[in-house]
Image (cartoon, rainbow, N blue to C red):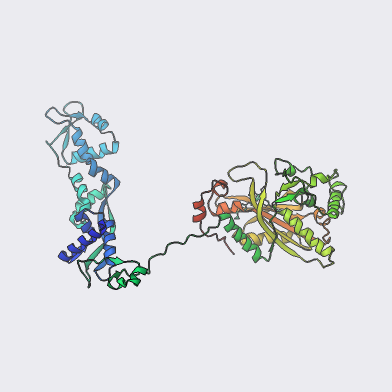
Amino acid sequence: MSADNSLAEDILKLLDKRQKLNSLSLSNELSIDHQRLVGAIKSLQSIGELIRCQQTETKRLDLTQEGRHIADNGSHEAIVFNAVPAGDDGGIEQSLLMKIIGNPSVAKLGFSKAMSQKWIAIDKSSNKSIVKRNVQSIEDEVQVLLKKIGSLTIDEVSDQQKQDLKKRKLIQEVVVKSYDIEKGDNFTLNIVKQETDLTAEMISKNTWKDKQFKDYNFDAMGIAPDRGHLHPLLKVREQFRQIFLEMGFSEMPTNRFVESSFWNFDALFVPQKHPARDLQDTFFLADPANCTQLPVEYMEKVRSVHSSGDFGSQGYQYDWKTEETQKNVLRTHTTAVSARMLYQLAQECQRDGKPFKAAKLFSIDRVFRNETLDATHLAEFHQIEGVVADVGVTLGDLMGLIQEFFLKLGIKRLRFKPTYNPYTEPSMEVYSYHDGLKKWVEIGNSGVFRPEMLLPMGLPPNVNVLGWGLGLERPTMIKYGIDNIRDLCGHKVDLQMVYDNPVCILENH
Ligand code: FB9
């Protein structure tokens, strides 16, 4: 028999004698933790109609931390009294007494209370304030009362006592939930063990017939089924994906981390000497170091527009090298994917003689940069990119698209700041006013793709292409209140954070 079964039996025996019990009074009487007693009562309550149980709320007096300290160590006034030497020649200079007590608030309050209780007096017959005992001994009533407060009902403490102790912040009123229990219609002292499972053996041997079964508790919460958990980045990515889909965009295939320098840079009219193509910024592959499967005819047009200029542009006037364009890199932006998709659009139009079909495309995926790492930057991050290709679309359309996109994130106040990108002209950084930081913060980049990028692909000259992009990590860190990116991504991530973080709902207007 478990300890709590015997406790349950003790409760039944007391109930049989007294007809009515209260859990709080009983826990004090039996010196048993109230919660343990409530557990035993709940187990009796689950046995149909054995007892009747009514929850009640009673106000109790409880000791504050200061009250507990005094109950253990004595009141301030008692400490001061005990520090004054006893005997006819007893006495101590007041300043020394205060120093001996140590704690200034104990000394000050204790001295004042001891004086008002006339436990001590000050002898000023000499030119010093000598504190002497006024009585032989004292009864530290405050400590005595505090020691028994837990076992008294609120009415057993006088109003004056309560007022004094509350004023000294030694006690506080707390509401305690307790249970009044009475005999139920099926009260008995002989508790029959209640089965919780109907077993195959009981059925095969028919022993179930003489057993009692615990009622099902249909209100009990089930065990949370273990299940997979989405990383916060993937939750936020899904929200951005929904925004693009709502705006009629289709997702680009981004399942290629290794890209040739041709698609990652040259097709975007990024010159081969651009600093972004240095080792300090880009991860180059050792094996396979080069990609040789490039569209030769298109590549020659790219060579031309870079080196001598073409398609109305003077180009960069440098010796464009095939071996440079063949170098494999980890893609530094998803704009490489946009380039492939735009080339495909142009080919469908040029090769297949189909009329140009406008396109709204998006991508959200990982990109890699050989950057200096810090609290908000890793060597890889996710880029979100939107691209719109259509006849006659303008910079104004791009600003409207960006306004619409960020409005779905609850961001209304935007500003556009001119900037430079090798593959777009004009280009704009996007800023939003951060109410918390009280300043404008950069939330993205954008621009109109250059003819030097679009015309070598074979896109019709009246087709313009707009693009904008932002990162996924920053909004995710903001959304989930994460300061260091290493708490969001990487081998040091606490998986419990992945389990615990809530569903992501980005403001939707
Ligand atoms: O995401 C960025 N900031 C940002 C975004 C959202 C946000 O909160 C959400 C709204 C609630 C808070 C901040 N930035 C771009 C700006 C900075 O964080 C910057 O420090 C980091 N940038 C990344 C690249 O850094 C090397 C963010 C990333 C970025 C920058 C540019 C593009 C994409 C991602 C682009 C582009 C582009 C341009 C023209 C045509 C096509 C694509």
Counting the numbered discs, the total is 0
Q: In this view, does 14 lie above or below 211?
A: above
Residue 151 seen in this snapshot: yes
Residue displayed at 21% across by 62% down: 9
Q: Is residue 393 left or right of residue 315?
A: left
Q: In this view, does 315 lie to the left or right of 248?
A: right
Q: In which quarter of the image is the C terminus?
A: bottom right
Q: In this view, does 481 lie to the left or right of 372?
A: left
Q: In this view, does 81 lie above or below 323?
A: above
Question: Which of the pair 194/69 is nearer the observer?
Answer: 194
Q: In which quarter of the image is residue 179?
A: bottom left
Q: In this view, does 128 lie above or below 291?
A: above
Residue 199 seen in this snapshot: no
Q: Is residue 297 above or below residue 187?
A: above
Rendered location of residue 88, percent (x, y): 11, 29
Residue displayed at 24% across by 61% down: 8
Question: Which of the pair 146/351 is nearer the observer?
Answer: 351
Rendered location of residue 81, percent (x, y): 19, 36
Rendered location of residue 395, percent (x, y): 74, 58
Question: Which of the pair 79/267 is nearer the observer?
Answer: 267
Q: Which residue lies furthest to the top in this view?
A: 127
Q: In which quarter of the image is residue 378?
A: top right
Residue displayed at 77% across by 46% down: 290
Q: Quadrant of the N terminus?
A: bottom left
Rendered location of residue 185, percent (x, y): 22, 73
Question: Which of the pair 33/314 is nearer the observer?
Answer: 33
